[in-house]
Image (cartoon, rainbow, N blue to C red):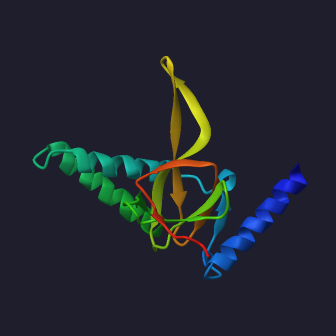
Amino acid sequence: MNRILLCVAVAVEACCKFSGVAQTAETNIYHWETRPQLTPDRQKMLRLQKNVENAREDSPLRTERQQKFAALHEKLGPLAVRAARPNELIMSPLGTNACTIHNPTAEGLVLTVSIVGDLEQLGSRMASIGREAYFAPGSTIIVTNLYWTTPSTAKRETH
């Protein structure tokens, strides 16, 4: 079983290189299971960003959160992250149930990704769970059994 997974991983990486996903030596390719994780500071930064966006313009809490966000952004510097905008990340199919999601920007981005079968019981119903995925600048994550993403990704067909 491990040999089959290794062969699939090698084939997927080769497909990425030939499809133009890995265009530079600096491009990092990760599999979903080994993708980089969000640090507590990055998670806090995302939370503050959402709080600022959702707060009223005249709210004193908004000003306080903007200051905290700016301080954290300065502390993290190039390691800062933000939520991805719709169609900012690029998804390319690799086969029947595999695709790559690529961050072409020079910023760290976060996208919510759901995998088929990643379910949790919520009350009397089963619900698909979205996981926040960190995409380093120029990185690519190989995902199998992708169910949905939010925000949406731009789709690039491979030839």
Q: Horizontal placement of 141 versus 58: left or right?
A: right
- Residue found 79% across the figure and 60% down from its top: 8
Q: In this view, does 123 lie above or below 13?
A: above
Name the residue: 78% across, 67% down: 11
Decide which of 60, 152 is in the foreground and name it.
152
Number of numbered discs on residues:
0
Front residue of 135/157: it is 157
Q: Is residue 30 visible?
A: yes
Instruction: Name the quarter where the C terminus is drawn.
Output: bottom right
User: In the figure, is residue 11 to the left or right of 80?
Assistant: right
Residue 68, percent from left and from top: 30, 52
Q: Quadrant of residue 24?
A: bottom right
Q: Residue furthest toward the left? A: 58
In the rendering, at what x and y percent does residue 23 appear?
A: 61, 81
Q: Give above or below for 64 relative to 71.
A: above
What residue is rendered at 33% in x and 58% in y?
A: 71
105 relative to 120 in the view: left or right: left
Name of the residue lying farthest toward the top: 124
Residue 3: image location, x then y, percent: 89, 56
Q: Which of 53 and 154 is in front in this view?
A: 154
Residue 41 in view: no
Residue 51 on image: x %, y %: 28, 45
